[in-house]
Image (cartoon, helix red, strand yellow):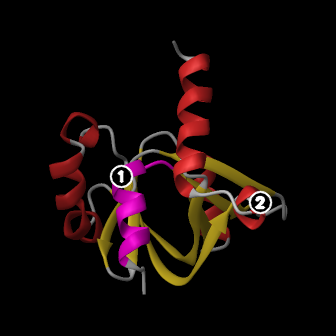
Amino acid sequence: MIPAAVQKLITDWRLGFIATVGADGRPNVSPKGTFLVLDGATLGFGEIRSPQTLANIAHQAQVEVNFVDAFVRRGARLRGIATVHRRGTAGFDAVFGPFQATWASLAHRMNAVVTIAVTEVRPLSTPPYDDGATEAEMVALYKAKFGAMYP
């Protein structure tokens, strides 16, 4: 269900922005930098400082995560059903291995692993592509922009 190109995007960038909805109906968007593709239909992140995200998932398990390659200005929106696996449970132990292997220096700080069973994947793109911009032009533009911001 998660196309290979989207799996590569997630593996390369890791930073995803997860949208949840709280019990009061208000949306919440929170960056998470520990995303992994667990299999062709599941992704997850290691929860370190996300009590509001976990509370919102407990209220409403439907989430959306956005990933964007900041240089090509393309990405993906993934929707799905989130499940929280808290440390000390069998569910946590069952999914923690890849997080331990990838995030060894952060793994001890993970209070939970949130898995997302992906139900929908949609592309994200910026308007310059509609006007004929190429990926190479976008990369050159944003390399220059980031280079000027962070010399």
Percent across and percent down for residue 20 are 68, 62
Magenta residues, start to end = 4-15
Q: Is residue 6 left or right of residue 89?
A: right
Q: Quadrant of residue 37?
A: bottom left
Q: Image height check: is 111 above or below 64?
A: above
* Residue on which the image places disc 2: 127
Q: Residue at x 22, y 34 (%)?
A: 105
Q: Amino acid at mark 2?
A: Pro
The location of residue 87, given as percent across then percent down, is: 30, 55
Q: Which mark is residue 12?
A: 1
Kindly tell me whether residue 83 is visible in this rendering. yes
Residue drawn at x 28%, y 37% as measured from the top left: 106
Q: Hey, what amino acid is under mark 1?
A: Asp
Q: Quadrant of residue 142?
A: top right
| Secondary element at image label 1 | helix
Tell me which numbered mark, 1 or 2, is placed earlier along the sequence: 1
Left-right relation of 118 to 79: left
> Closer to the camera, 110 or 70?
70
Position of the N terminus by quadrant: bottom left
